[in-house]
Every structure is written in C-alpha cells, then in structure tokens.
Amino acid sequence: AQKVTQAQTEISVVEKEDVTLDCVYETRDTTYYLFWYKQPPSGELVFLIRRNSFDEQNEISGRYSWNFQKSTSSFNFTITASQVVDSAVYFCALDTGTASKLTFGTGTRLQVTL
Amino acid sequence: DAGITQSPRYKITETGRQVTLMCHQTWSHSYMFWYRQDLGHGLRLIYYSAAADITDKGEVPDGYVVSRSKTENFPLTLESATRSQTSVYFCASSEAQIQYFGAGTRLSVL
C-alpha cells in the first residue's frame, strides 16, 4: 500500500525566512512519481512539480526547490525568502502509475507573516 | 475558457436527498477523478475513470455513484446524502500523469 506522510501540520514563519516542508513516502513500487500541490486560501489546487523515481536530481524554480532522496524516501520542498503570497496548504502526493491515482499526504499549512 | 469546471461551487442539502456534482473538462483528457477533502485526511480518491464508460472505485467509494457517458463529463452522485458526506469535493483530469483540478464544490449535508 502507498502512504505519504507530512508530519508538519502547520508552520508559521516571518517573511523572508526560508522554510522546508517535509514529505516522506512509502511504496513497494520501483517506478513512481512524486508531486507537490499548493492550495491557496481561495481553495483551488495548483500543480507545482512532478518528479519520477529515476530522477534524483534536485530541482530549483525561482524561490522554490525540491530535494528528492530515495535513500530516506523523502521529497522535501524548500521555499527561500518566503513571501506572504506563499501562505497556503501544501500537499505532497504519490503516484505509483496505477491509473495515475494519487495518494495525498494530509498537507502542511504554511503561514507567512510580515 | 478551457480547463476543468465544477458545478455547483456550493451546495446545501438535507440528509437522504440525492445530489449530483458536475465536472466538465475541455482538454479531452482520458483520465478523470473525484476526490473529497476533509481536515486531517488530505484528499482521498472516491472514484476514477480511465475513459468513457470505464470507471473504478477509489479509496472511499461507499455512498457515491459515478458515470461517464462522454469523455468530457464525469458527474458524481450521492444517492442518499449523509452528514458524513459533508466535505469539499474536487474533480481532476490528468495528462502525462499530472492531475489538474477543478475549483471544488463545498457540500454541506444538514
């Protein structure tokens, strides 16, 4: 069975601080995909990144970066120099390729204040 | 506008009533999904569909029915709504294993 754990329920930071959101996953499949989605206060779910299990390269997109480590089954997400607009709930998700079904973590609520 | 549209955005109903949530996508994606979002559970898959006339259960299918007669539509029906079905419902479609979500329907069952 697949499982995604986001142990941090809520994180509060002051603007311009760096923050890392943790994601740990469990699967017996060797081929899988990992995702991060953002859910701002307006409620929609916004796709941020997809990473496949064969690509352990870290990725950077502007202030966002992702660290994928198969050895620890983790796919952590770092926001550098956080901004108020980063306030949202962030979900990590796992797709083992079976009909593209996603298994979501319970989400981490990030609050960025001035 | 192209994309995935859910209707209604908000719905209040009473226990025992039948409710249908609509989902329409303009991309012609093969796969479509229904999730519910509840505090402490993240999003959980209710049903999914690989193509028109092909549907299958997800993690929490009890009390729900789906159909998919056309590729672009994937309605979700609560046959006899219960209070435990109060939730936010998200529809999604996928392309290249990336799922794109609708804006959600907030359903309250009184």
Image (spheres, coloured by chain):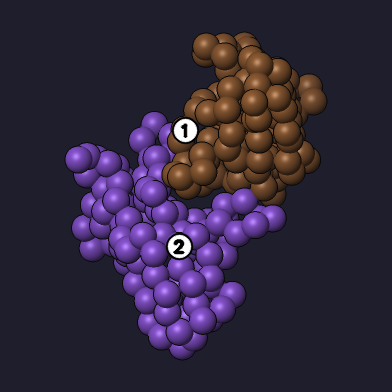
Chain colours: A brown, B purple
> In the figure, residue A105 lies in which quadrant?
top right
Q: Can residue B27 be spotted in the picture?
A: yes
The three-letter amino acid code for the residue at tag 2 is Arg
Q: CA distance from mark 1 to mark 2?
A: 21 Å
Residue B108: x and y in percent read 49, 72
Callout 1: residue from which chain?
Answer: A
Does A82 sit above or below residue B81?
above
Mark drawn on residue B82? none
Q: Residues within 10 Å of mark 1 (few under 14, many from 20)?
A: some
The three-letter amino acid code for the residue at tag 1 is Phe
Q: Residues within 10 Å of mark 2 (few under 14, many from 20)?
A: some
> In the figure, residue A60 lies in which quadrant?
top right
**Could you tell me which residue is drawn at 60 percent across and 59 percent down?**
B38
Does A12 sit above or below residue B38?
above
Q: Which residue is mark 2?
A: B106
**Could you tell me which residue is drawn at 73 percent across and 33 percent down?**
A12
Quarter that holds the N terminus of chain B: top left
Q: Which residue is mark 1?
A: A47
**Could you tell me which residue is drawn at 66 percent across and 16 percent down?**
A16
Does A98 sit above or below residue B11?
above
Callout 2: residue from which chain?
Answer: B
Q: Residue furthest bottom?
A: B16
The image shows a total of numbered marks equal to 2
Looking at the image, which is closer to me, A25 or A66?
A: A66
**Could you tell me which residue is drawn at 52 percent across and 11 percent down?**
A62
Does B22 sit above or below residue A10?
below
